[in-house]
Every structure is written in structure tokens, then in C-alpha cells.
Image (tube, grey):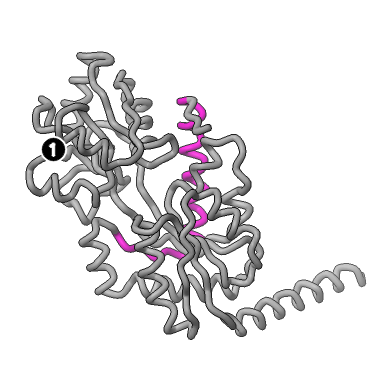
Amino acid sequence: MGHPIRLILISILALMAGMAFGQNFPNRPLRIVTSEIGGSSDLMARLIANGISGPLGQQVVIDNRPGGSVAAEAVMKSSPDGHTLIYYGNSLWILPLVRKSVPYDIVNDFAPITLTVIAPTILVVPLSLPASSVRELIALARAKPGGLNYGAAAPGTTTYLAAELFKAMTGVDIVRVTYKGNTSAINDVLAGNIQMTFAPAGAVAQHVKSGRLKALAVTNALPSPTYPELPTVAAAGVPGFEAESIYGMWAPSRTPTAIVSRLNQEIAKVLHQPDTRSRLFGLSMEAVGSTQEVFAEKIRGEVVRMGKLIRDAGIRDE
């Protein structure tokens, strides 16, 4: 009889300790570890830092670390007290799927705080290509096996995986041309040197709006509010297709629930502000600000779904 009672008392004391810890949070400046200066993650991390520093009563500094693995390891090893966080996009959970030796597990080593934004990816082709829809592109690719090239950044990036998913789900034979970054691939589509690429919406917005590129569809699961005139790839001929760029905030695992909840609330407030939503909309980003549970479920689903694609396609980034 005494043993179960002791366990209950220990659980209650642990919960009370966590709540007390949460009430003392934060007691020093916070640090958000993110990607290189100037990227989408850096921009969002700074926007969030500026928004939460006032309500939390502490300075929030940005720590830029190129390479998701380096950033993740630094945060994973930090004290789980809510003062060190990581802000990143898809590569954070894709890296362990495409590399053999990654020092972290996205599900077990981090506590999800909130899904912050969704950034659409757009399937674009040059004006010279005789295809103005996803169905026409698929038909053209099937008529010319190996005759169409697509540009993609490194294995594991959203644009790379979107193209591989497109190949897998349509059965088309298209040839990959690998680039160091999306900009180079976009430039070659503009020049007509390659026939297609899946590009971040913000990177091709000016070219699409000016009529220099043909945009065929967005890769979101649902129609994008930022590009309402474009169908989804799924609705345009590839049912079930989904390849979104999503960004979020995590704390180290074992961070007290009270602290994670407080961070979730403050970050969501920033993202739900009309001026924030408007600014992000202008950058082709959709503000979300989800619950912790929704974010955790999204990541678990992406790891399973994209993990299967990566294994089936034999994608590796050594």
C-alpha cells in the first residue's frame, strides 16, 4: 500500500517543483539558436525575439550557427530551463533521415513549443516550356523519358524532397541537376537551361508576378492564402502530394511543461498580431502559432512520411 502512495507523492512534488520553476522563468536573457544570418529562420527568429522580450522581461539574443546539426547539438546539450531554444525549418528533422551520423533525435531530444509559419513552395517552369499545368507537365515528361531536367538544392532540402516526391508519385523520369542553393536553380529555369524546379515562394515571387516564370502549383496540402490563384499539386493531378516548408521553435527535452507553455503563449501572441501576419504575408509566409500538441503531431507525421520517401528513393547526404 505504501509504495503506490510514495509514487503519487513523488509525482505531486515533481509537478509542484516544475510549476515553481515556471513561475521563476525567465531569470536571465534567453538565447535562440538558428541558421545563418539572412536566411528565413534567422529572419523569423529575430521577429519572435523582438516580440517576446518585452512580455518576458528579458533580452532575447540570436545565436547564428550554420548547419542544423551543429545548432541542434548545442541546444540539446544546454540546460533544459527554457533559456536556450532552437528555431529551424524542415532540415532539422530531415537531416537525421538523410545522414548516418547525426547527434540528435528530433522527437526524443527536443520539446516542441510551436509551429510558427508555413512557407509555400512553388513548382515553376520556364516560359518556353510547352506546359501550363501540372497535368501537361506530367504528360510532357512521360512523352520524353529522361528529357526534362529539374533543379534542386542539396539532398534533404525541401525543394529536393518535393521533386523526389513528385517523381515517386507520378512515375516520371526526370533528371536532377544539383545546385548549391535555390537561387542558382531559379536562374537556370529563367534562362531555360533546365525545365523545372520547386522553389521557395518568396524566392520566385517577383519572377512569377512579372511574368518571367510560369507558376504551375503550390506544394501545400491546402490552397495557399499567399497564392490563392494557384492550385495545389495534389488538386492539379497528383492526389496526396504535400511538401511544405514549416518552421518552428523547440526547447531541450525535459524542459518543464510550465515553461514550454509560457513560451508557446508568448510566441503565439506575436504571430497572431495583425501587423506580424501582414508582414509575413508580404514575405510569402503564413503565420500559424499552433499548440504544442499540434506541432508535435505534425513533426511525427513528417518524420514518418518523408522517412519513407527518403528510404524508397535511396536519398543520402554523406
Q: In the rendering, at what x and y percent does residue 199 appear?
A: 27, 42
Instruction: Assign a secondary structure to mark 1.
Output: strand
Q: Is residue 183 magenta?
A: no
Q: Which residues are magenta?
A: 286-313
Residue at horizontal 33 percent and vertical 34 percent from the top: 179
**Residue 2 found in image quarter:** bottom right
Amino acid type for the residue under numbered disc 1: Lys
Residue at horizontal 47 percent and vertical 29 percent from the top: 315
Query: In this image, 5 relative to 174: left or right?
Result: right
Judging depth in this view, the residue of 157 and 271 nearest the camera is 157
**Residue 189 found in image quarter:** top left
Q: Which residue is mark 1?
A: 214
Judging depth in this view, the residue of 195 and 143 nearest the camera is 195
Residue at horizontal 47 percent and vertical 79 percent from the top: 59
The image shows residue 86, relative to residue 143, as above or below, that is below
Q: In the rendering, at what x and y percent does residue 118 appear?
A: 34, 55
Q: In the rendering, at what x and y percent does residue 146 appear?
A: 28, 15
Q: Residues within 10 Å of mark 1 (few under 14, many from 20)?
A: many
Residue at far right of view = 2
Query: In this image, 248 relative to 169: left or right?
Result: right
